[in-house]
Amino acid sequence: MTPMLILRRAYIIRRLKKCGAVSEETAKTLAEAGVVNPGFFPKVTEMMVRQGHLLKTADGKYYLVQ
């Protein structure tokens, strides 16, 4: 993984943590979490879900795995 992708992954985690997206009930879209350019590097977000770092709700919101 390139440094840019590593930074993006860390940034998404920080933003979701800061807004309290830690359960399905508190899940947020990336835009709601304050992620700048939420569509930037969509493969990073998909990879984070596949690897189990994030969970995605049916309505497209994300939350951190505790």
Image (cartoon, helix red, strand yellow):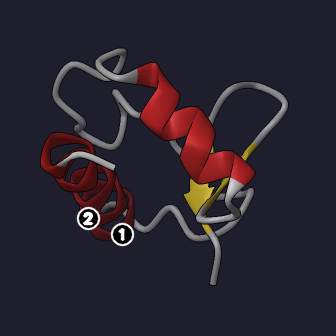
Mark 2 and mark 1 in contact? Answer it, CB < 8 Å.
yes
Location of residue 47 (image quadrant)? top right
What residue do we see at 33% from left, 43% from top? 33
Q: Is residue 57 above or below residue 43?
A: below
Q: Is residue 64 above or below residue 54?
A: below
Q: How many residues crowd mark 2 within 10 Å: few (<14), some (14–19), many (20+)?
A: some
Relative depth, front residue between 50 and 62: 50
Q: Position of residue 44 (x, y in %)?
A: 44, 37
**Tag 1: residue type?**
Lys
Relative depth, front residue between 5 and 35: 5
Q: Position of residue 2 (x, y in %)?
A: 23, 45
Structural distance between the alpha carbons of marks 2 and 1: 5 Å
Secondary structure type for disc 1: helix
**Tag 2: residue type?**
Arg
Q: Position of residue 61 (x, y in %)?
A: 62, 36
What residue do we see at 26% from left, 43% from top? 5
> Is residue 27 visible from the viewing direction of this image?
no
Q: What label sits on residue 14 in the rendered view? A: 2
Q: Judge from the rendering whether residue 40 lies leftward or rightward of residue 49; answer left or right.
A: left
Q: Mark 1 — residue?
A: 17
Where, quadrant-wise, is the C terminus in this rendering? bottom right
> Is residue 4 visible from the viewing direction of this image?
yes
Q: What label sits on residue 6 in the rendered view? A: none
What residue do we see at 34% from left, 50% from top? 1
